[in-house]
Structures are given as structure tokens and as C-alpha cells.
């Protein structure tokens, strides 16, 4: 029999926040308690969602009575109350299933902490399974000279999302001239290191590599007659918050990645917001009909592959006499069907 007391409607609750294991304080959500209890019920063969909701209400009543409005309970405190409520309401089998579920979750958290070299895990770490986190650690997360991690998955996806949004700043009508009829502005010196994480797009600070990439893109636009304003004018707009509206673009792309609905290619994950800044995986390199050009193109191929390129197509430049009837070659060669 489930004990019923006062209603746990949101407006009646004293408790409205909870402290996560990583120290964050977030809004209290009774639905999460209901879902956890229902999973324990389902593990015993039950399918009674109404029972889960009733037990959840009792849990909330106990939490409200114990902590009130002035104390923020931790996640572990709430889980202890769930176990107590289940036992007190005659749900011993469900309580056992919940304890087992809780232990398994603790083991997963502990393993993730070891993989990521952290004392606690955050909401992004939770979104990815252990194998995915191992891949991120092995291939993409930044490390120091000793091999120790100096970046979290959350930081990785943030730097990628910020970098992906940078072109948006330059393609706005106040900067970009689609007719390409602008006279090039004078070259202006710029030290990205000086402004490392001192300018931002909304809540997102730009690191030195974001700024390097932004300056490279601007310089290309400027050479092509596409920049309506000088670099200094553009950068002043950035510092004053004129481009903060693009924070939404960063948020949207970040959420797509963290929700695992979309993931960019390997070079983008490794290089966006990082030293190289290269996001392309495929390159087409022209080669002229001379030994010097052939060797130069082979060198560029090796460099591109070292930086993360997957396929590099070597094709003969147009306008040159062909010396062979063989089709353009692809390097590295595609694997055989056998």
C-alpha cells in the first residue's frame, strides 16, 4: 500500500533545486524520480506507471519535509529517500531492483571518471557510452606533453561548435559584399594570443585558434573584394557584441552533437578550435606535367594526410597535354573488394 499525503504539485513544493554530483545546482524535477522508480518496477516485471507516480509523490513529500526550502539536497540524498520510500511502502522487490540499478550506474560513472581522468562526470559525459568516451580520449581530446587529458568532451564540443559558427559572422550583409566589388582594405596586424578568450560570441569565448581562423577567413574575403569593412572595424564590432546573435547558431550545433544527432568529420573534431583549424578531409591537388610539380604535389599529399586528410585526389591540371591515357589516380588507393 502506498501512503498518500499532501499533493506534490510543483507550486506546493518547498524543494525546487537539487545539487548534481559535479556540483551544479539544477531545477528539481519530480519526473526523473518517477522514471527511475518505473525502471525498477519494470525490472521486476511490472508495468504500473501509476504506482511509480504514487511512489514518486511520496518521495517528494519526504524530501520536502526533510530539507524544506532552505537546504538543497544532493542527488545521493534523493536516491536514499527513494530506497526508504520503496521499503516503507511494501515494495521490497522494487527496492532491490532500484538498489541494483543504482549500483550499476555508480560503476559506470566510476569507469567514465577513470577514462576521462576526472573526479566527476557532467551531463555531456553521461550522454556518451564508455566506448565512445574511450574513442574521444584516444583520438580527439587535447592532452599535455605527458599524455594527460587537459580537455573534457564538453569543452571539445564547445570549441567545435564555436568554430563552425565563425563563417556566419563574415557572411552578414554588414560585412559581406556578394558582388565582390570592394577595394581590398589595408593589411592589419593582429595577435590572436593577445585576445585569447577575451572576446566572445554571446556566452562563448573565442580562443586564439578561433581568432586565427577568423582572421584567415577575413583576409581571404578581403583579397577577393568581398569585405565591406576593414579588419579593425570588424573586430571592434565583435568586441562590442554586435555578433552575439550568432550565439544561437553555436547552441544549436552544440546540441546536435551532444544529442548524437550529427557528428562532423574527423578533421573537424580534432582541429576546430585547435592548432591546425583544418576541417576538410578531402583535397584535390593539381599536378603539372613536370617532375618538379609531381614531387611538390606528392609532398602536399603527405602533409595533408598527416594533418588528417582521408583521401587526396591527384588530377592532371587542365590545359596540359596528357602523357598517358590512364584515368586520374586516387591516393591512398581504395581497398579491393576481396
Image (cartoon, rainbow, N blue to C red):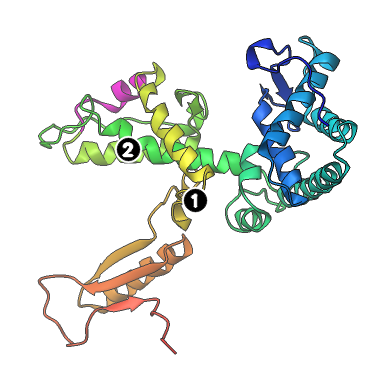
Q: Compared to 330, does 224 lie above or below?
A: above
Q: Compared to 137, does 11 lie above or below?
A: above
At 16% from the left edge and 37% from the top edge, which residue is drawn?
225
Q: For the residue carrying disc 2, how many other residues have a C-alpha within 10 Å: few (<14), some (14-19), or many (20+)?
A: few
Q: From the viewer's side, name the closer residue of 181 and 113.
A: 113
Q: Does residue 67 appear to the left or right of 177 in the view shown?
A: right
Distance from Cα at disc 1 to Cα at disc 2: 17 Å
Question: What range is drawn magenta here?
Answer: 227-237
Position of the C terminus by quadrant: bottom left
Q: For the residue carrying disc 1, how many other residues have a C-alpha within 10 Å: few (<14), some (14-19), or many (20+)?
A: many
Q: From the viewer's side, name the closer residue of 91 and 70.
A: 91
Mark number displayed over residue 254: none
**Which residue matches tag 1?**
269
Q: Residue 274: image x %, image y %? A: 50, 45
**Which residue matches tag 2?**
167
At 52% from the left edge and 44% from the top edge, which residue is drawn?
259
At 64% from the left edge and 16% from the top edge, which residue is drawn?
10
Position of the N terminus by quadrant: top right
Q: Residue 164: image x %, image y %? A: 40, 41
Does residue 209 show up?
Answer: no
Q: What secondary structure do most residues of the magenta stretch adopt?
A: helix
Amino acid at each position: 500500500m502506498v501512503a498518500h499525503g499532501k499533493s506534490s504539485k510543483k507550486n506546493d513544493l518547498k524543494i525546487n533545486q537539487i545539487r548534481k554530483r559535479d556540483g551544479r545546482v539544477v531545477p528539481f524535477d519530480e519526473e526523473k524520480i518517477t522514471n527511475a522508480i518505473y525502471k525498477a518496477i519494470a525490472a521486476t516485471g511490472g508495468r504500473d506507471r501509476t504506482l511509480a507516480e504514487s511512489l514518486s509523490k511520496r518521495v517528494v513529500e519526504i524530501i520536502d519535509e526533510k530539507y524544506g526550502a532552505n537546504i538543497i539536497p544532493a542527488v545521493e540524498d534523493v536516491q536514499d529517500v527513494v530506497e526508504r520510500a520503496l521499503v516503507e511502502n511494501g515494495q521490497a522487490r522494487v527496492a532491490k531492483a532500484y538498489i541494483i540499478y543504482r549500483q550499476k550506474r555508480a560503476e559506470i560513472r566510476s569507469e567514465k571518471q577513470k577514462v576521462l581522468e576526472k573526479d566527476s562526470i557532467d551531463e555531456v559525459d553521461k550522454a556518451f557510452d564508455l566506448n565512445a568516451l574511450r574513442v574521444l580520449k584516444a583520438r580527439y581530446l587535447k592532452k599535455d606533453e605527458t599524455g594527460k587529458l587537459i580537455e573534457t568532451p564538453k569543452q571539445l564540443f564547445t570549441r567545435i561548435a564555436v568554430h563552425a559558427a565563425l563563417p556566419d559572422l563574415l557572411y552578414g550583409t554588414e560585412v559581406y559584399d556578394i558582388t565582390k566589388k570592394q577595394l581590398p582594405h589595408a593589411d592589419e596586424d593582429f595577435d590572436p594570443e593577445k585576445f585569447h578568450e577575451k572576446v566572445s560570441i554571446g556566452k562563448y569565448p573565442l580562443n586564439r585558434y578561433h581568432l586565427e581562423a577568423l582572421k584567415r577567413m577575413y583576409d581571404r574575403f578581403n583579397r577577393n573584394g568581398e569585405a565591406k569593412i576593414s579588419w579593425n572595424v570588424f573586430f571592434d564590432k565583435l568586441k562590442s557584441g554586435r555578433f552575439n546573435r550568432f550565439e544561437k547558431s553555436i547552441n544549436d550545433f552544440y546540441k546536435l552533437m551532444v544529442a548524437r544527432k550529427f557528428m562532423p568529420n574527423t578533421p573537424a573534431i580534432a582541429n576546430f578550435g585547435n592548432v591546425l583549424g583544418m576541417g576538410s578531409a578531402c583535397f584535390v591537388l593539381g599536378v603539372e606535367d613536370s617532375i618538379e610539380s609531381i614531387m611538390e604535389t606528392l609532398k602536399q599529399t603527405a602533409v595533408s594526410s598527416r594533418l588528417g586528410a582521408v583521401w587526396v585526389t591527384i588530377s592532371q591540371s587542365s590545359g596540359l597535354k596528357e602523357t598517358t591515357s590512364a584515368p586520374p589516380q586516387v591516393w591512398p588507393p581504395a581497398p579491393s573488394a576481396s
